Image: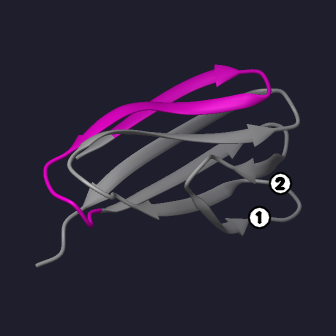
Amino acid sequence: MGVSATGSGSLASSGALTTAASSELLFAAGMTGAVFTAPGSGFTSRIVTSPDGDLVEDAVAASPGSYTATASLSGGIWQLQLAAFQGA
């Protein structure tokens, strides 16, 4: 399951994704014409590529429900995707 959004400005947002269970891995990846500067609230930044400043961030769902990935950037166009993965 996943969602994706595009836009411009200093805050990227993936759109809302609904998880079915707690402990699902929330995995987000973003591309930008600028530079991502920080992960969204509750997410941990794993990669910010150099020199182009793209982003990978993740979190673990605390409970079933709606989640949205966000990330701050220096301004400009962006795309942010969010996917949820359940353990076996």
Q: State the image quarter where residue 68 is shown.
A: top left
Vertically, is 45 above or below 2? below
Q: Which residues are magenta?
A: 3-24
Name the residue beneath numbered marker 2: 52
Characterize the local packing of mark 1: few (<14), some (14-19) or many (20 or more) Cα atoms within 10 angstroms. few
The x and y percentages for residue 71 are 67, 42
Residue at horizontal 43 percent and vertical 59 percent from the top: 27
Horizontal side, residue 51 vs residue 12: left or right: right
Residue at horizontal 20 percent and vertical 49 percent from the top: 64
Q: CA distance from mark 2 to mark 1?
A: 6 Å
Horizontal side, residue 23 vs residue 10: left or right: left
Tell me the element at label 2: loop
The main secondary structure of the magenta stretch is strand
Quadrant location, the C terminus: bottom left
- In depth, the one of 88 and 31 nearer the eye is 88
Tell me the element at label 1: loop
Vertically, is 86 above or below 38? below
Residue 49 disc label:
1
Q: State the image quarter where residue 33 is shown.
A: top right
Characterize the local packing of mark 2: few (<14), some (14-19) or many (20 or more) Cα atoms within 10 angstroms. few
- Judged from this view, the residue extending furthest toward the front is 63
Residue 19 disc label:
none
Q: Is residue 14 magenta?
A: yes
Horizontal side, residue 52 vs residue 27: left or right: right
Task: Name the amino acid, label 1.
Answer: Thr
